[in-house]
Amino acid sequence: MKLLFYYLVFPGFIFSSVVGLLTVWLDRKVSARVQWRQGPPWYQGFADIGKLLYKEVIIPREAFGSGFIAAPLFGLASVILAVTILCVSFFGMSEGFIGDIIVVWYLFTIPAIALVYIGSTSGNPLSSVGVAREIKLLLSYDLPMIIVIVMIASKAGGFSIRSIMEWQMANGSNISNWYGIVAFIVTIFCIQAKLGRVPFDLAEAETELGSGILMELSGGVLAAYELSKAIMLFGLPLFLTVLFWGKGIIGGILIYLLIVVLLILIKNTNPRVRIDHAMKYFWGWMSGAAIIASLLAYFGV
């Protein structure tokens, strides 16, 4: 019963959906203010999801019907599970398990895989281009991110969320060291790419591909994707908070909000990059920076 409550209410589906959609509103509101616009009301995200749920789901002739519908639901379930595992440790509701930090990261990857499946079976050539870009981007940012996660977990002496948080409570936040600063810069760009936000919104790229990989999504299928993306916008900044702050709920919430605002500012101050430039950037500069951070951590700098 406790596990069911965690997954469905707090910190699972209901809590993560509400906070995720409010974070989307914050994103849109701050973006509007940066562009000298008014921005939407706080309930706009909830209204958008509700509107999509009432619309018809159109399945392309080439697509496998049940898979086309099940894939985004599977992606949504994975991000809810990821946020639940993350939050129960962050809020001190559970000790978690060994390796949960790796499990959470790869649960956040499943929505992208689900989207690749949908785009691949849609039969739309623009969606196919978006699929190719999404796969390349996924393979690009994953390498430097894993290097950073392994480095931080090794420093903490355990691959669990609680061990990383407890190590920082005893020894100081990772962000207070040079290796932490370099690693944070790497991860903030990896998270931006994982969320598919400017300058890494290559799979959608509305000015080039219409809606790209999302071209054939509609109704409840699109609602499930948008909701999973909103929950990721809540979960991934919290993930970084655990990796680099990990000290107390109040301080962690403030750092979380700071990370969200930073992601918003990156989105509004950078042009979209080409996919080959993005791959070189992550496999070159970001992977190199992650290795440098690992060496600094090894030498205690």
Image (tube, grey):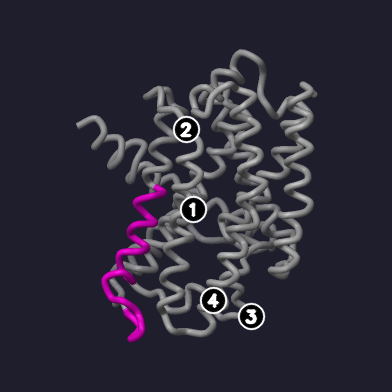
What residue is pinned by disc 1?
109
Q: CA distance from mark 2 to mark 1?
A: 16 Å
Q: CA distance from mark 2 to mark 3?
A: 40 Å
Looking at numbered disc 1 in the image, what kind of residue is underneath it?
A: Thr
Under circle 1, the secondary element is loop
Q: Earlier in the sequence, mark 3 or mark 1?
A: 1
Q: Nearer the viewer, residue 116 or 40?
A: 116
Q: CA distance from mark 4 to mark 3?
A: 8 Å
Q: Residue at x 37, y 62 (%)?
A: 72
Q: Earlier in the sequence, mark 1 or mark 4?
A: 1
Q: Earlier in the sequence, mark 2 or mark 1?
A: 2
Discs 1/4, front: 1
Circles 2, 1 touching at the beta carbon (< 8 Å):
no
Discs 2/1, front: 2
What residue is pinned by disc 3?
208
Dot 4 alpha-carbon crowd within 10 angstroms: few under 14, some 14 to 19, many 20 or more: many
Q: Is residue 10 left or right of residue 299?
A: left
